[in-house]
Image (tube, rainbow, N blue to C red):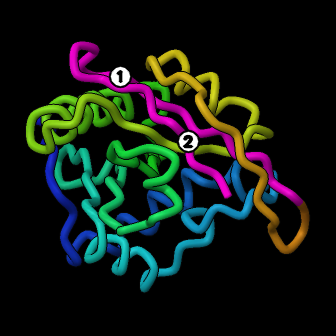
Amino acid sequence: MSEQYRLATLEDAEQLQAVTVDAYETIRALNIPFPAGHATLEVIQNNIVQHECYILEKGGEIIATVTLDRAEDLQRQAISPYPFIRWFAVSPAHKSQGYGSKLLDWVEQHIILQKLDAPAVFLATATRHPWLAPMYERRGYEPFYHKTVQTPDRQEEIVFMIKTLDPARYKTPSVQTG
């Protein structure tokens, strides 16, 4: 069976919801309030319509997904002008098999670097998650900004991480706060 990389469609929503919610079990167990961890079908559908939700599928089964945020989020743009990825998830039945890395590599190279012509990409994750930040660091992402956000239960420390895709054109973001 061959692997296919493509944009998700609304027809993928139910399968995407199952993959995302299953993959975010650790997030829920840690009580980290990331929306993907509690994504309803409607939230998944909105994500597909409002952003660029990419999937890696094999034999008609969605193995992994990642979203490239298209939102005009001025707060995020003040942190970095580069594309922002979010909602990265790998089906638990397929984790530790390299599928997530393959999808991220494809999105970084074919979408962010080639299609968008962006020299870097960034993301954010909770610092108290035990393995997410180290996983992204192994992929070449470097922390460049920390922010504390207030959630209903606690203050959550978020780390923003950036990966340079084209060093010749990359300019370090100057974070504007306040």
**Residues shaded magenta:** 155-178
Q: Is residue 15 magenta?
A: no
Identify the secondary structure beneath mark 2.
Answer: loop
Residue 63: % across, % down:
33, 46
Q: Residues within 10 Å of mark 1 (few under 14, many from 20)?
A: many
For this orientation, the residue located farthest to the bottom is 42
Name the residue type under label 1: Thr
Left or right? Give the position of 18 relative to 131: left
Q: Which residue is mark 1?
A: 164
Name the residue type under label 2: Val
Which residue is depicted at the point 37% across and 64% down?
Answer: 16
Specify whether residue 64 is in view.
no
Tag 2 or tag 1, which sits nearer the N-term? 1
Specify whether residue 34 is in view.
yes
- When the figure is inspected, residue 67 is found, relative to residue 163, above or below; the finding is below
Q: From the viewer's side, name the closer residue of 106 and 29.
A: 106
- When the figure is inspected, residue 46 is found, relative to residue 110, above or below; the finding is below
Q: From the viewer's side, name the closer residue of 130 and 115.
A: 115
Which residue is depicted at the point 21% across and 39% down?
Answer: 112
Residue 82: % across, % down:
34, 42
Q: Is residue 159 magenta?
A: yes
Identify the secondary structure beneath mark 1.
Answer: strand
Q: Quadrant of residue 3?
A: top left
Q: Quadrant of the N terminus?
A: top left
Q: Which disc is residue 35 wearing?
A: none
Q: From the viewer's side, name the closer residue of 80 and 63.
A: 80
